[in-house]
Image: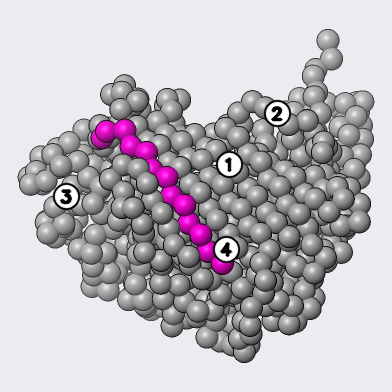
Amino acid sequence: MPHHHERDRGRRAVRPTTIACTGLLLAGAVWATQGARGIGEPAVGVKSEASARSLFSGVFAESAASTRHACSFAPGTRMAYDVVSDTRIEVDFGRLSDDVDAGGQVQLKATPAQARQTERSWHIDLVALAGEDDGASVLAARIEDRGTVITGDAAPGVAPPAALSDTFLIRVDARCAIREFGWRADGDLAAARDQQQLAAGLGFWAPSDPGRAASYAGTGFDSTGRYTAKYHHEDGRVTGEALSFVLADGVASGMTVGVEIVASTIEIALSEDAWFESLSDTRELEFSVGERAFGTQARTITARRAEAGSFAPRIDPGDAGWRWGVLSNMLHDSSQDFDAKLRDLPLADAMARYRELLAGGQLGDYGGLLRGWLRANPERTGELVALLRAGEFDGQQHARAGVFWALGAANTEQARTALVGVIREWPETRHQISAAQALAMVERPTPEMVEAMVESAGREGLHAVERGSMVLAVGTLAGTNATRSPEVAAAARAEIRGWLSGSRDEQQLGHALQAAGNAGHDELAADIRPFFAHESATIRRQATHALRNMSPEQAYPSLEKMLADDDRTVRTSALATAADISRRSERAPTAAMVELAAGSLDGALQAEEHAAVALLGEAARRGDARADELLRAHVKARVAGPEQDPQQLAVLARSTPGHWRAAP
């Protein structure tokens, strides 16, 4: 069955990511089969390579709002599937010689080449609980783990089944993609991660109209990471391939690693009364450092429809005891990543080396050195903090900032305790702000950290800018830990929600909106929405910008409204925000947004025009013929105009699909 585009049989390079070096791949052969590693972010969080996006030009792509509910289910619909995943990992760090730059303060160990293959079998029962207005369905799910077989270097013959909890929830988009999962707040998070990791491989994008042939693009996530794929549908069968890939959060720490898709094949048989009849997804990835390959991962998932059992739980999806989202990876303990030579190194010697590296101006180098020293000598953290308290770095902005960065990045209990102490006990506001910003970096935050940051932000006598810095740090902590530490992130969002409802001062309200934007969680959309009607254009602009990290489902309807705002700066913010969301989520702007953006092309100031061009460019790349037409007409009008600005023409050409060259 031919694709809309002929398949590029060459390899598709994906933007470099970073990955933990120690126990990198084999620590869980792992990503796609064991609960020790979780899945990445929801589909709306995908960023793909520009080169991959260019392949979407002319390929059919639609937003969820335009679907015909190809994968919606009436309450009570039952389904079941038998699933097998087969993953093969091969790693040889010996291929990396000493002249390869791994990036940052990373120690490569010449471990022997290793290979491991993992096969996991399981059964999943599903029953639809409720349908939603946009066609999405909430499914209750139960997994029966039928065992794991591991073969290869230093591997046990059989791995015991994971302790999966009885029931969890899946919110499935009307076009069959998985949006998010539900788990009990008082449940076992490790088991919930394992459930999500297994079920995530079943998601895909169905056509908007199952009755016709179509080619289109979609984004998704699974146990290994986040991907963008192109699909073709014809006669009830969907075929496709992954175009770009980003490793899941949590394996991304340590050295810079390139990921390349060597091969990819997706085959799905659709069903009129179920999620699908059968699914097969095969993918091979290659990992490299400094353009030198050191490992591969080949993974195949096959799922076939099975006889539905008697699974019929009584569940209210709206019960406050359910938490929604996607649990991130169980993070690698980075506090153990350090150069052994730093152990017992006198602080004076470490500081001498720190100042030498400081002259080079690379935070990853000078800050990385102190981070490693703190990890190697956690019991001596107080010595470094004492230097800071004594004024050793006063008047030295970069040196002082590097110390706080190292305390935040060390991720040791001693460093976290020291930062909380700075916030609560030190009198200098500048130190409190730096400590709050450092705590926002911590991989495993605690409720005490949120409390300390909130208390400091509410302290009397703070300048508005100082208070704002504290508030923004709370938002950053909430956004960074939404999937890593969901309960702590939820506590931070509750504080932001309180600031949004309780702030009367316009400047404080602006800070709260910025914090909500940093948090970037859909549940804050309802708290932001009232400010779109605020009398202040500044507040409306900040509220619009606060949607930048939210899903298209939550953001696009509000952005449509703000694109018609009377104030130019609000419209510009709405245009830029919509373009950012489309670029991040790979979801085309709506037809209404395209038409509204057209009104900002002519007679607008340059900032608004550029933002409109950016939005139309994202729509055109995803197959919107109207956006493509508007862009091309605008470029031609600019070229034919009496005044030509080469820089402005370059901006327009970059946002317009096709090949443009200067006339001789």
Q: Residue at x 20, y 52 (%)?
A: 375
In front: mark 2 or mark 3? Answer: 2
In front: mark 3 or mark 1? Answer: 1
In front: mark 2 or mark 4? Answer: 4
Query: How far apart in space, not on screen, are marks 4 and 3 (Cα)?
Result: 39 Å
Neighbour tally class for label 1: few under 14, some 14-19, many 20 plus, Cα within 10 Å: some
- Asked whether the residues under the numbered discs 1 and 4 touch, taking CB atoms below 8 Å apart as contact, a structural biologist would say no
Amino acid at the residue labelled 2: Asp
Query: Magenta span covers which residues?
Result: 111-123
Using the rendered image of the protein, determine whether residue 405 is visible from the camera's viewpoint: no
Neighbour tally class for label 2: few under 14, some 14-19, many 20 plus, Cα within 10 Å: few
Quickly name the residue at label 2.
Answer: 8
Quadrant housing the C terminus: top right
Query: How far apart in space, not on screen, are marks 2 and 4 (Cα)?
Result: 29 Å
Amino acid at the residue labelled 1: Arg
Quickly name the residue at label 3.
Answer: 376
